[in-house]
Structure formats: structure tokens, C-alpha cells
Image (tube, coloured by chain):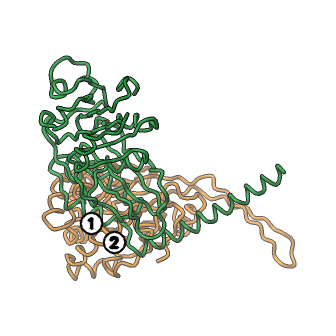
Chain colours: A green, B orange
Amino acid sequence: MSDLNPLGTPGITLVAGPPGIGKTTWISQFLSDSNHPLFYLCPGAGTETSTEAIDRLRVGYCFPQVTVIDDSQAADLLMNLPNQAQVYIEVGFHLDLAALPFNELPCRKVAIVPPELAQLTAQSEWHSWANELVAGNNIQAPNNIPEFRRMALTGQVFDPPSLEVLLTEITGGAYGPVIRLKGIFELPDGQAFYIDFVEGLEGIEYTELKLVRSLKGRPTRLSGLEVVGHSLQQTAMAETLQASCLSDELLTQYQRQYRQHYKAAQSTDDKTTNQTEESVA
Amino acid sequence: MKLAVISCIHGNIEALDAVLADIDTQKAEEIYCLGDLVGYGPYPNEVVEKIRSRGIPSCQGCWDEDIVDGLNACECSYPSQLAEYRGHLAHEWTDKEIHPEVREYLATLPITLKKDNLCFVHGSPNSQHEYLLPSMDGFAALERVLATDADVLFCGHTHVPYERKLENAALSVKVNAVESSETEQQFQVPLKRIINAGSVGEPRHGRPNATYIIYDTDAAQVTLREVEYDYEKTCQAIIDKGLPPIFAWRLAKGMEFAELADDPTHVCER
């Protein structure tokens, strides 16, 4: 981080790469820095709150100290950057690198690419665009531009075994070949999970987001699903998603049980703490 | 004497034809069917007609019962909300498709069949819906076999074939009757076996191939047969006949359509 802006001036870092290569993961290593105002932008990701980009949500949930901005705020921010600010701009695979409006800015351009491509001196669109290549996940970059589907899931809470089935089916190609899936899903115990799949890497990754448990009615925080692939059958996928979501009645039952469970657990913890304090005294 | 035991055909006529052809090559003298002739698959009437025309004795499966009596299983039938949703779609489709005489035939099927020291059931002797999983508690498993008064209990329902030997079972009973001293009795249970025939039409072993069992009554020998067939024809028929296309994808992957037992201690309460 320190070598980015040795003079302490604002820094802009553009990060590009194929889907699933690890762009957000690479950026995340810099987002815990508390010495600089931090900004994150994912251009072309849409500004409708109902279909928020998963990367933007993930960064916002995992790094609350980072200001996540949308396209409409970008120009103003870049013209009036706070002193020592660091801006990370994640460039989606669907954007034309040569036509990026940010290309003219004084910035660091990082391309995250498959390891074998990072070692090559041969030209690719990444080589000609970036001034720095970083080896990312060991995957095959797609030869042609894949389809991209985004589905809003805000307010939906999933039956856990159904979620497992639907993720197995989607990533297994039941609704068209999939090369990338990422989503944020709410579960009946009030927790939200970030779920990540990259074709060529092993398994489906589940990461618990450290958020306040949502146990009173339908969650209002944003959640959703993004799938990248070919010939995707969105209607069939949406039907499966819908059939995996809990009804109001079931959600109410689950939430009542979990509230009682956590209340009892809290009570036990309190007693244990008191007993410990008494024995210490 | 060689017996063939088939189960869980689920309206998959292509798989049934392939298995019957394979049974012919094995020179089995008798065939027993453990039920679930219908449900999920695209040819329920044709499968029942084939079983009847070949004179194959069959138990009643849980799906056969549901088509006769309607859906009233407890929650054990479905491992997830999604599975339940799909199961109901399949039931609705099958219920409309099935011919009246086929429904009448399914209603006549017995819960158990017996031949000498062999007993044939769909799920367990207690219920067509109860799963005898290989991980079931040994005492409970033994109780299920003893209840039939047989030495070998053939079952299906789980869609995963297995053979389980229950041997060296010693039961000790202490009786402390009023006005008498405590008495203890020991029982040595002879070898009992549970043999699961897997599934002809809806396998769950990661491949689309049908499975069934050949049992040699003289040698008490079990042979698991796995039979390739043109599953793509069944997949196409699933789509053409208006069943959920995801059933075709799951069949091709050797994944069961919806039901999956995951609790070996659960006893169905329907």
C-alpha cells in the first residue's frame, strides 16, 4: 500500500480481469487500511437498489469503513478526492477496457490474470491495457463474452437444504453452463452468507457475513445472486429460487424458535459469567 | 434357484425394459418387484402394464399408495422445501396421467410379499414410507426383520442398493415379575439379512444406470447388477410430456429427483 502513493497523495487503482479471477479478493487486502479514506467503485454495475451488484454489497458488508459509490457519484468524487484518499475501481469483465473513461486519469492499472498469462510477455488485451499484471486464480479465461444474469433476493430467506440443492444444480449446469456464481443469501437463523463459485476451482465457498442477525420479519438489507455463463435459463432458475424461499408462515416459526434459542443461550452465558466472577471474587 | 428383485421403477419404461432384458441373460426363474412403479417418470401406465403383463408380483410402494390414497405422508418424505415442491408437481402430473384401471391395480398391491424364508417390502414392514438405511440402529434393523418371520428382508425406497448382515445377535431379557425372583433369558438370533435392491428408474449413485439384485437362494448369494440403458430417451420424454425439465437433468446425473432419506432414526407417522 505504501508504495502506491509515496507522497501521500490520493491514489486511484483500476483493477480488471476475467470473471472469477479474484479481482474483489485482491482489492480486499487493501480495504482494512484505516489510515486513508477508502472508496470502492464498480462501474456499470447498475444503480437500482433492488438489483445491487454483489461485489458492491460484499465490500459494503465486509468493510463498513469503505465508502461504496455508484456511477453517478464517481465523477464528483474523482474531481474532489479527499487528501490521501485511496480509490479502488473494479472493472467488470463486460466492460471494454480500451473505452474506459478512467483510462485518462493518473492511476495504477492492475490486471488480475491466470498465472500462466501473468508470466507471458506475449500480448493480450490485459497486457496492452495494464501497467501491472498480477497472477490470480488458476482458471481458464473464457474465449467469448459470457452472459450475465443478476437476480434481486432482498427480503427472501432460504430453506438451507433447498439452497444447497439449487446451488448444486446451478453450478452443475442444470440451467446452462456456469463459469461464475456469487450471491448473498439470508438464512432462517438470521445470518447472511456470501456464496462464491468459480468454474475450475474446487467446490462452492460459503462465507458468513458478520452482520446483525435478522430475526424479526423479512430482512431489509440487500441480497441477491449473480450468475455468469452461457445460454442461461433465467426463468427456470428463478422458479427454483422461488421454490426454495420460506413462506411468511414458516419464516415466522423459524424466527420465533431462533429468538428463543439465542435468548436461552444468552441467559446461560450470563449465568456462567456471574458464576465465574463470583468464584474469582 | 435364482431370483431377480427390482424396485423403484418410477415410470421409467426404458430402464425397466433394459433390466428385464438383463434378467433374461441372468436366467432368473422368478422376479419380484418392491413397488414404486409410478411417480416422477414419464411412463407410469406403460410400466404398470409391463409388470402386469409379465405377471411379476409386486408390493405397493409409497408412490403407488399416494396415487391411490392421495398425498398424506409426514415430513419424512422430503428432505427440503424444494424437494417437496417438486414432489407435488410430479404427483399432480402422475395423478392426471394415470389410467383408472392402473390406479385400481395399484390399490390391490400388497404391503408385503413372502416366499419361504424371504420377505419383500418397499420401505419397511411397518410402512411403505419408512427408510431402512444402512446406518439404521442395529437393534431396530433386526426388529424389522424379525417382525416378518423371515431370514432375508428385501427392501427398496432408498434408491441406494446395499446388503446388511445382522449376525451374532444375542438378546438378553431380564424379567422381574411380582412375587417371584428375577429370571434372565438369553436368545441367540440366527443370521438375518437386509438386502436393498436400489432403483431401476431413478438411481442415486452418481450414474444414470439402473440397478437391481440377483439372489441365489441355494447359495444365499447376492449379486448387484448395474445396467446401462438409453436414459436420454427417458430424459427427452420427461421434457416432451411436460414434467419439470430439471428431472431430466437430475436423471442424467444419477441424482434422485427429489426424495432423499437423511434421518435413519425417523419413523414415519402417517
Q: Position of residue A164 (x, y in %)?
A: 38, 55
Does B65 appear above or below A196? below
| CB contact under 8 Å: marks 1 and 2 | yes
Residue B207 can be seen, yes or no: no
Does A24 appear above or below A48? above
Q: Position of residue B202 (x, y in %)?
A: 30, 58
Element type at marker 1? loop
Checking the image for residue B63, the label placed there is 2
Foreground of the two, A193 or A250: A193
How far apart are the two marked residues, 1 and 2, measured between alpha carbons?
A: 9 Å
Report the quarter where the N terminus of chain A lies. top left
Q: Amino acid at mark 1?
A: Tyr
Q: Amino acid at mark 2?
A: Trp
Upstream in the sequence, badge 1 or badge 2?
1
The reply to the same-chain question for discs 1 and 2 is yes
Foreground of the two, B11 or A42: A42
Element type at marker 2? helix
Give the quadrant of residue A108.
top left
- Closer mark to the observer between disc 1 and disc 2: 1
- From the viewer's perspective, tell me whether residue A274 is left or right of residue B157: right
- From the viewer's perspective, tell me whether residue B175 is left or right of residue B54: right
Which chain is disc 1 placed on? Answer: B
* Residue at the outermost top position: A121
Residue that numbered label 1 is attached to:
B40
- From the viewer's perspective, tell me whether residue A188 is left or right of residue A145: right
Residue beneath the point at 20% across and 39% down: A93
Residue beneath the point at 24% across and 58% down: A48
Foreground of the two, B53 or A93: A93
Crowdedness near tag 1: few (<14), some (14–19) or many (≥20) residues, C-alpha within 10 Å: many
